[in-house]
Amino acid sequence: MNPIAGLGGPAGQKGSDAADIRAIADKAGYALTSPDRARRAVAQLAALLDRNGRGLRLLTGPGLLGEDAAEGLCPTTVLGPAAPASSSADTRALASRLAEAGVDLILFAGGDGTARDILDSVGGAVPVLGIPAGVKIYSAVFALTPMAAGSSAAAWLSGTGRATARRDVVDIDEDLLRAGLASPTLHGTLNVPVDPSRLQARKAATPASDANSVAALARAFVRGMAPDRSYVLGPGGTTSAIGRELGLATTRLGVDVVRNGALLAADVDAQALEIALDGKEATVVLTPLGGQGFVVGRGNQQITAKLLARLPLQIVATDGKLASLAGRPLWVDSGDDDVDAKLSGYAKVFTGAGTHTVYPVHRVFEETQGTTITKEY
C-alpha cells in the first residue's frame, strides 16, 4: 500500500508525488484515504475466499505499507519496521520481496506512480491488480473500485485457469500536469487477472476531430447558464472549453467556480471550494474521463462526496465521447456508497444546443463482504 496515494486530490495538487505533499495535506487537515480503500478491498477478498472455502495467506509490508489495512487477518510482514514516511523505494522493495516469496498475486493500493514502481520492481514476473487509491489513475491495471478489486482478486484466486492479460501502465509528469500540460506516457505493461466487468480501461485522449463539437457544446452550455448561479467546472477539455467561451482563464486540469460570467475561484482545493459555495445556489459540471467513462473519483477529488450529496450534477460530453465508450456506462466512485447510489441511474448528459442524451451511470458494484451483486439500470 502506498499510504499517501490520493492525498493530493482534495488538496488540489493533481497528484501526490510532491515531496512536501504530507505537510501540505496535514496543514489543510486532509486525512489519508488510501488505507481505508485498501482495507475495504482486502476485507472483501478475505470474506469471499472464506465463503468459497478457500484459505488466504497474506504477505505484506509493516504498518502503513499494508499491515494496518489487513487488521484481523494475521498477515505476515516481509520487511523490517516501517519508516516514519514511506517512499517509492519502499514500494519497489516490498514488491520485490513479495515476488521472491512466490505469491500468487500482488494486490497494491495506489495510483499510476505506484503502478510504475510495481512495474520497475517485478515487471511481468507476478500477476498484479491495482486498488484505485490515487488521484488520476489513468492506467488499465486497476479495478473500478476497491470492492471490485477485492472481488476480482477473490474470483481469480478461486479459479482454475487464472488467465492474465498484459495491460498498460501510463503516467504523467505531475509538474507538467499542474501547468496544464497533460500528456500521459506509456511505461510498459503488467500481467493483470482477466476480469472485464471489474477492470477500468486506460485513459484515452479526446480526438482532435472532436474539437468543433466541443466548441459548439461550450457555446450552447454558456447560453443556457442561469444568472446568479455558481457553476463548479471540473477538470477536462470540455469543461475548459466552457471557461474559454466565457472568456475566463480557467484551469484545464483543476476545479474552478464561475458565476455571472466571472471567475469566482480558480484551481481550488476542497476547502476553498466549500468556502466559495457557502450559501450559494450551484451546479457541479463534470465531463467523463476519455476512454474510461469515470465522472466522479478520478482527478476531481476536490469535489467531495459531501458536496455532491447536496448539489445537482450536470454531466457534459460530446456525442463522440459517449460513442467512444462503446456502450460502457459512466462510472462514479466518490468513496461514499450513499452518494454513489444517489448519482447512479440514468443521467441527462448535455451534448449540445438543445440536446441531451440519457445515459446510464453506474456505481460499479453494490458489494458487501461475502456478496457481489452487479447492479443494472
Image (cartoon, rainbow, N blue to C red):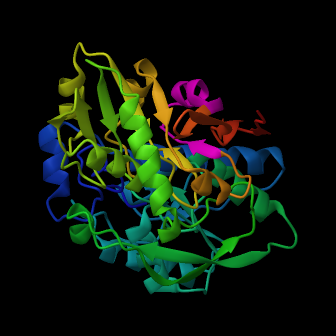
x, y percent for residue 174: 26, 67
Taking the image as shown, residue 6 lies to the left or right of residue 157, namely left
Quarter in which the N terminus is drawn: bottom left
Residue shown at 46% from the left, 53% from the top: 214
Furthest-right residue in view? 160
Residue 346 highlighted magenta (yes or no): yes
Q: Is residue 68 visible?
A: no
Q: Measured along the vertical axis of the image, is residue 4 above or below residue 161?
A: above
The quarter of the picture where residue 311 lies is: top left
Q: Nearer the viewer, residue 65 or 41?
A: 41
x, y percent for residue 289: 50, 54
x, y percent for residue 16: 28, 59
Q: Nearer the viewer, residue 198 or 275?
A: 275
Residue shown at 39% from the left, 79% from the top: 93
Taking the image as shown, residue 340 lies to the left or right of residue 4, namely right
Q: Measured along the vertical axis of the image, is residue 212 above or below residue 12?
A: below
Residue shown at 19% from the left, 56% from the top: 21
Give the extent of the magenta segment. Answer: 330-347
Furthest-top residue in view? 279
Residue 263 highlighted magenta (yes or no): no
The quarter of the picture where residue 284 lies is: top left
Taking the image as shown, residue 131 lies to the left or right of residue 363, namely left
Q: Is residue 342 visible?
A: yes
Q: How many labels sit on residues? A: 0
Q: Measured along the vertical axis of the image, is residue 104 above or below residue 234?
A: below
Q: Nearer the viewer, residue 373 or 196?
A: 196
x, y percent for residue 187: 45, 84
Q: Nearer the viewer, residue 33 or 93?
A: 33
Taking the image as shown, residue 34 lies to the left or right of residue 72, namely left
